[in-house]
Image: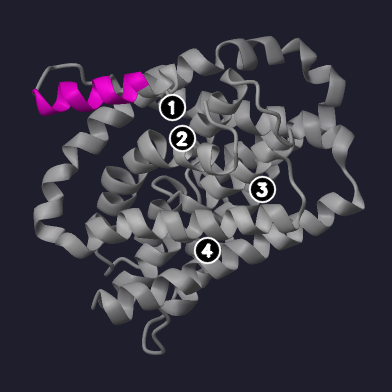
Amino acid sequence: MQLDVVVGFFLLGMVAQLLKAPIRMPKGLYQSLTLFLLIAIGLKGGVALNSHASGDLLIQAVAVIAFGLALPLIAFPILYKIGGLSRIDSASVAAHYGSVSVATFAVAVAVLEANQIDYEPYFPLFVALLEVPAIAVGLWLARDRNQTLDLKKTAHEIFLNQGVLLLVGGLLIGWWAGARADTILPFFGTLFHGVLALFLLEMGRIAASQLGVLRSCGSFIASFGVLMPLLGAALGALLAQLLELSSGGVILLATLGGSASYIAVPAAMAVALPKANQSLSITAALAISFPFNILVAIPLYSVLIGQGY
């Protein structure tokens, strides 16, 4: 079982940060890499959606939305009853784990393509569908009758934050353009793995920089950051089997179920739940779950369904 080459850049970033080597990436470049990956994933999925739209896809989409609603409902009692976190912190962390990590999905796609494992090309649609439901459930779980929620500002952060807007925008452009998108796909396709490698280099550094926060978060958050992805992945794989997806599709839905958002959800929660301890969510999602997913979980999911690489 071998790790994909792009994961090596993530490890390099972690090691450099732990050794205090000065390789911090310019903020503008990091943002550009993020924009590229979001558009590339959405665009490619939209082009596939143009030729794969069907009644079966609609059923799959509804099932995926239901999956996104269920994940935070599963995570919340674990955090609240077992972990002893406050209601608002439990709801915030649960929302992060009900949503998805686009970067984790990108790594899984890179692994499948490198190993020539087929998957449903319209999967970015499921990524977009899983971004929002968990945020709504998280806000419902954290509801306080004495607190007034700024619905307009919260809705703006949920639906118009960078991650959701570019991913959905790329998806819609690809769906609308269809074959006409071939003129720009060489750029977004050929450079995808190289851009992902650079992005993971910075992600490795950021993840390592969050490790010190674990001392104040306690062992429960560290354990949750590993066990919740495994639980979410198991449920995702089961759903994929019920939907009769390909082997690659099972791996991808397991990956999405086991990932946690650190872009779209933090932005929304910061506005909607300003009293929540955001460091808990970011540390669990970025310092624990993200490295665990790309270093251990994705290879594990692949092996367990008979597609070892």
Say what amino acid the circle numbered 1 marks: Met
Badge 1 marks a residue whose secondary structure is loop
**Does residue 216 show up?**
yes
Badge 3 marks a residue whose secondary structure is helix
Pointer 2: what residue?
299
The circle on residue 1 is 1
Q: Nearer the observer, disc 4 or disc 1?
A: 1
- Cα gap from disc 4 to disc 1, whole angstroms: 33 Å
- Cα gap from disc 4 to disc 2, whole angstroms: 26 Å
**Residue pictured at 34% horizontal, 42% vertical:** 292
Badge 4 marks a residue whose secondary structure is helix
Question: Is residue 130 depicted above or below 248 in this figure?
Answer: below
Q: Is residue 170 magenta?
A: no
Say what amino acid the circle numbered 4 marks: Ala
Q: Are marks 1 and 2 in contact (CB under 8 Å)?
A: yes
**Residue pictured at 56% horizontal, 52% vertical:** 131
Q: Earlier in the sequence, mark 1 or mark 2?
A: 1
Q: Is residue 15 magenta?
A: yes
Foreground pick, 277 / 49: 49
Q: Earlier in the sequence, mark 3 or mark 4?
A: 3
- Whole-percent x and y of residue 93? 35, 63
- Whole-percent x and y of residue 218? 14, 62
Q: Earlier in the sequence, mark 3 or mark 2?
A: 3
